[in-house]
Image (cartoon, rainbow, N blue to C red):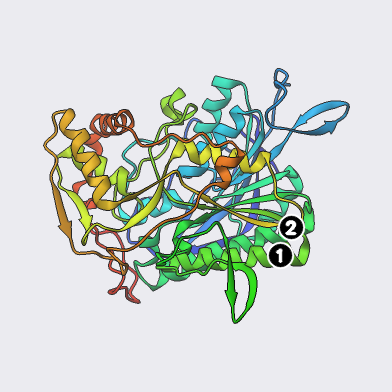
Amino acid sequence: MAHLLSVSCSLSMVSGGRSFPKTSSQHSPSSPANPSYPVSKSELRIVCRENKISMSRFHAKAVSTSQESRFQAGLGFDDVRDGEQAPKKVMVIGGDGYCGWATSLHLSNKNYEVAVVDNLCRRLFDHQLGLDSLTPIASIQNRIRRWKSLTGKDIQLYVGDICDFEFLAEAFKSFQPDAVVHFGEQRSAPYSMIDRSRAVFTQHNNVIGTLNVLFAIKEFKGDCHLVKLGTMGEYGTPNIDIEEGYITITHNGRTDTLPYPKQASSFYHLSKVHDSHNIAFTCKAWGISATDLNQGVVYGVRTDETEMHEELYNRFDYDGIFGTALNRFCVQAAVGHPLTVYGKGGQTRGYLDIRDTVQCVELAIANPAQRGEFRVFNQFTEQFSVNQLANLVTNAGRKLGLEVKTMSVPNPRVEAEEHYYNAKHTKLVELGLQPHLLSDSLLDSLLNFAIQYKDRVDYKQIMPAISWKNIGVKTKTAAV
C-alpha cells in the first residue's frame, strides 16, 4: 500500500473524509505533493461537493536513509536504547502552523526526534477566505526537505486529521512519542465568529481532536507527556489578579484550591476551556501527565531556525481574522494605513515573542509534569494595552521615516475596552525562560520585514469584518 516519495518518505492512504465549511473559491490548498515531489497514485485533494468540502487524509512518514552524526549530549535526550543514549521523541500536532512550524524546527535543532502531524487545513482557510500570508511559505514537504538538506536532521511527517482516531492511532503506534505538543486546533477567535458553520467546526475540531489525543495517549503511550497550547483568553479580564491555573479561596470559613474561573469571550475561547476541563479530568482519572500553556498574544516571525533559508520562512498573518495585534500594526504602518485600534484601545493582554513560544515549549518538555498531574503555566512575558502597542509602533515607524497614524474603529468584539489586568507568569521563568522583551530593535526589525514584503499586502484584508454580534447562520465565503 505504501508509495515511495522522492526524499525517503512513505505515503499511505487513510480512509475517510472530513467536512469543512463550504467555500465558493475555485482554488485548492497546497498539495502535500508538489510538482517536484513525485507521488505514485495518491495526492491530497479537495473534493467540492454539493454542500461541503471533503479532505482526503493521508499519512506521510519521513524515513531516514542514513544514520546522522551523533547528537551532542545534554539536549533532547531521553533514555538509553540499544546501549546508546536516544533522543526524546516529540510529536508536534499542528506543526505546519505559525507556532507549530517554529517549534518543530527549534526542537529538531535541539536534537529532539520530531514528527509533525497536520491536516494542512490552515492553508485551506486562506483559500476559502481569500487571505494570504505576508511571507510566501513553502509546502510542508519542501520545508522539511530543505531542513534536512541544511542540517542533516529528519522530521517525520504525518498528513491527516486528528479528529479521525484511526489516523491518529496509526501515527501514535508508528512514532511512539515521549511528548506530544498540541497546536492542532483552529486558533482564531474571529474565525469562530464568522458564521454558524465556523463556530461548529471550531468547537468540533478543537474539542474532539483533543479528546482523541487524550485517548491515544491512554491506549498507546501512557507515559507520554501532553504539552497543550491553551490561551490566556480562557481567563477573560477579571477585576482580580489572574493566577496560573489555580486559585486558593476561602468561602464560609472553608479554604480550597480550585481551577481559576473561566470567562471565555468567543466560541474559540470556549473550545479551549472545554479542552482544559477534559485534560484535567483525564489526568485525574487515567493518570495522564499534562502541561497546559496558557499563551498570550504572539508576535514576530523570525527564529534562529526559520531565518536559515527562505523555504523555512514562517507565515505572517496581518488580516483581521488571523493576524495578531502587533503584527497587524507593523504591516499597517509599513503600507501607510492608519493603525486600527478597536474601540477605546484599553484592552490589555499578555504578549510574547515567537522565540519565547518555542523556548517555553522546550522547557515544558524538558521538565515534564508528573503522572496524574495537570499543571498550568501562563505563557507570556509582558503586558500591553492596544493603545500602548500603537504608540510603540508609531514611534518606531517615525524613526524609519514612516508617517504612522492611528484610527479608532468600532470594536467588532464583545469585550471590556478599559479594565484591570494583572496576570501572574512566574513558573516558566523559574524553569529558566530567558525572555526576548519588546524593544526598539525588535520593532525596527518587524517594520523592516513588513516593508520588505509590502507589495504582497492585500488592502482589503486590513479592516476588521467579523462582528461578534452579527454572526449568522448563513455560511460566508470570500468576497470577489
Image quarter (top left, top right, bottom left or bottom right) of the N terminus = top right
Per the rendering, the mark at residue 448 is none
Q: Is residue 359 left or right of residue 396?
A: right
Q: Secondary structure at mark 1?
A: helix
Measured as percent of width and height from the top left, residue 294 is found at: 52, 54
- Please report the residue visible at 46 percent of the width from the left and 23 percent of the height from the top: 308
- Please report the residue visible at 41 percent of the width from the left and 70 percent of the height from the top: 197
Q: Relative to residue 250, is residue 313 depicted above or below?
A: above
Is 152 in front, or is 443?
Answer: 443
> Which residue matches tag 2?
288
Q: Secondary structure at mark 2?
A: loop
> Which residue matches tag 1?
282
Measured as percent of width and height from the top left, residue 309 is found at: 44, 24
Quarter of the view holding residue 330: top left
Mark 2 residue type: Ile
Mark 1 residue type: Thr
